[in-house]
Amino acid sequence: MPKVMKFGGSSLSDYRCFKRAAQSIKSCGAETVVVSAPGKRYKADEKITDLLKKADNHGIFSRRYRRLVAKRMRRIWTALKKDESVGIFPDSDAEFDAVLSDIFMQFGDCLLSRGEYFSAVVMSKILGYELVDAKEVIIFGDDGQPDLKSSILSAKAVLSGRNAVVPGFYGADKTGSVRVLPRGGSDITGAIIAAAVGAEQYLNCTDVPGVMRADPDIIKKAQAVGCLTLCQMYGLALAGADVVHPDAAKILCGGNVEMVVKGAFSKERGTVVSCRNVCACGAEICDRCKMSRKMPVADYKAVYQWKKTSSSGAISHSNFTAAAVSGRDGLIAVAYDGDCESKAAECVLGTLAAQGIYAESAYFLGSGCLMLKIKSPLVTKALRVLYGAFIER
Ligand code: ASP
């Protein structure tokens, strides 16, 4: 069964990263590769997509940003061409020149998509794979949104049986014009392709070792989670774990593809995200892991009564997997063993209430994920409380 591999921008930030990414693709044997635009090389750097966005926003004053993009692209291309071990043919320049001329000529969605297109040109040359334009794969409907059914059908028709590199983050509408997905959308491209080609694995390679148990910017010692269900991944991503776009988990939910979120250049296994995962108690939960199940916590005000010393007994650290928060929206997602639903809600809500943090709403998302909404300024405190109480091991 085929494998699909996606590389995020932080794993393709300079020419060395492209080389290393190509080596891991070869050793993994992935047939289809999805690439993002080159990301930041260091903290204060700018992603190519951000520079393209600035260029697009600055109208006639956009030249400065367009030049910066062209300079970075040229630097990557020239270094790879000079490197004999890479073996890019001298006659490949025409394709690179076409990308550069787009950088100076295009506007809007087409301009925004050129970072991914550049990455795909480069990666296809290094690997000797075909370059398949995302315009042939991701189809947008009349409502301006990607049409999942049509995209899966065309991805299957175009990609099956081929070794191909596809640019992430964009597709085309019925008129053939480029349309971009939301930011971080290469994850969505990868998920659509993985579902379409019936991949056994969708390796989502990024700059962290996996899905972390909590935001590492807030909890420095947080480690990667071993496995999650797609529902849990969806909830955590909605609540701010931006390692994977929530729609990527949603698209794969209910199917057979196993998504592995892992460090691009790390030997660690990463986080295995799949409907086939079992919860901590050992029960299979795939058939219950339905995204449509969004159930309010019954009378969540009453469950604030939970006390650590109470007879809730059976629940312990091993029942909780990860928590994520989104500062902007005041969302909190807690992933837990799907078999201890009501206890999980009691523990989480009760523990937060003991610290003066009350949820405005609470619901279960599928099985194994509790979503809460609290006042935005309290989210960091809430994450620390939950991590200390349940997730730290
Ligand atoms: N390059 C785009 C972004 O920065 C899409 C992606 O990386 O998935 O959001």
Image (spheres, grey):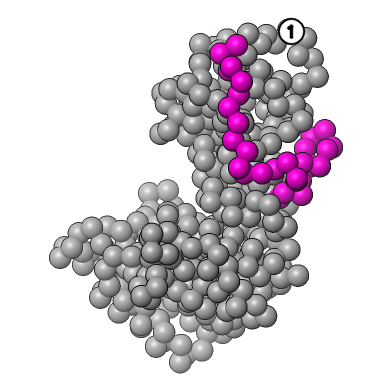
Residue that appears at 30% across and 58% down? 53
Q: Which residue is mark 1?
A: 310
Q: Is residue 226 above or below residue 264?
A: above
**Disc 1, SS:** loop
Residue 389 placement (x, y as % from top left): 66, 20
| Residue 192: percent from left, percent from top | 57, 63
Q: Amino acid at mark 1?
A: Ser
293 is higher (above) or lower (below) than 121:
above
Q: Which residues are magenta?
A: 274-302
Q: Quadrant of residue 171?
A: bottom left
Residue closer to the observer: 256 or 107: 256
Q: Residue lying farthest right?
A: 282
Camera sees residue 19: no
Left or right: 227 in relation to 300:
right
Measured as percent of width and height from the top left, residue 285 is found at: 77, 41
User: Would residue 300 be counted in the magenta stretch?
Assistant: yes
